[in-house]
Image (spheres, rainbow, N blue to C red):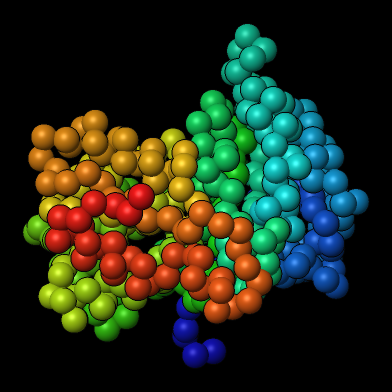
Amino acid sequence: MNGRPVRVVENLNHALHESMLADSRLYVLGEDIADPYGGAFKATRGLSQANPDRVITTPISENGIVGVAAGLAMAGDAAIVEIMFGDFAGLAFDQLLNFASKSVSMYGRPHPMRLVVRCPSGGSRGYGPTHSQTLLKHFIGIPGLSLFEMSPFHDNRAVLAHMLGLGEPCVFIEDKVLYTRRMAGDGQVDDLFDYGFLGAGDTAPAHVYTEAHGDVDCLIIAPGGMAERALAAMRDLLLRHEISCRLVVPSRLYPVETDALLDAARHAAHVCVVEESTAGGTWGAEVAHVLHERLWGRLRRPVRLVHSADSVIPTAVHLEREILVQADTIVEAVLADLRGEGSPV
């Protein structure tokens, strides 16, 4: 053992094992999740050997998988679903919109629905237009449905336990680029950045900084899959341009954790929200709305939103990079904001 933090997918796998060990009524469902395959990204490796009656490999029917899982949750059990590629969560949209999320409250009394739908998402792996999308924005604003995103700062054991404890359906976005990255540990990201949490508990938003206190030029708010690119941008901005930034990475994306974001934004001259989805009706727009409404009197400029290009995602690596948000995309957005330039139309 060399003491290095485990990879994110290993942490997630441990979280799934511990969740099943802690709750004998928890089921895991999905395509090809049983051993020896253990799922397309190996997050479920070993689960079926340890829990042969509660790990269910299913036919290819996302609508059916989520429907069965929601039925288990309605009956008092708990269920975690793996959608092999998050792009296919659209096939289960009706089950989440019209069954699972509504069942929490539409029967005249609160009805716990312990359901987590895991969605491996995002590009940067050359998988092409239908296997590289981030569909988070399509689930924003559904009453009774909470949205979380995996990050290298948040222990998946705590996040999974928190989601199951909410008693309402949750969608868990897992950016595929994170699976092979290592978890952050001991409050240090690298030689330049440290991190902590904006609040009590392991699911509070993570806070990455060079100095924990005082004002900065720009606050960057980004979900976990964008953290690595945001950190690369922050390093470049500091070392090449002497622009100081902080990064906030929420675990729970919706409903927006307002207080932590407001406190962080009060100490920044500018705010930039970064996400990989295409523009229009996004999580970033919801964050901007919250900040505008509460901080309009002191913000120097409107919150800048950074998205991927309005395009399908190509398979060729060099073309994919042009479409998806990169570290230099963030750098240019922050520089433009500090120059007082408007967002591109």
Question: Across the whole image, how many numbered discs are drawn on residues?
Answer: 0
Quadrant into which the N terminus falls: bottom right
**Residue placed farthest to the right in the image?**
59
Q: Quadrant of residue 41?
A: bottom right
Task: State the residue at coordinates (79%, 45%).
Answer: 62
| Coordinates of residue 102 in the picture (x, y in percent) | 64, 22
Q: Taking 251 as reference, is 34 above or below it? A: below
Task: State the residue at coordinates (36%, 50%).
Answer: 345
Q: In which quarter of the image is residue 288?
A: top left
Q: Nearer the viewer, residue 181 or 340?
A: 340
Q: Nearer the viewer, residue 6 or 219?
A: 219
| Coordinates of residue 341 in the picture (x, y in percent) | 20, 56
Task: State the residue at coordinates (73%, 50%).
Answer: 88
Q: Taking 203 as reference, is 34 above or below it? A: below
Q: Quadrant of residue 114?
A: top right
Q: Which of 323 and 200 is in front in this view?
A: 323
Q: Is residue 192 left or right of residue 35?
A: left
Q: Taking 122 as reference, is 110 above or below it? A: above
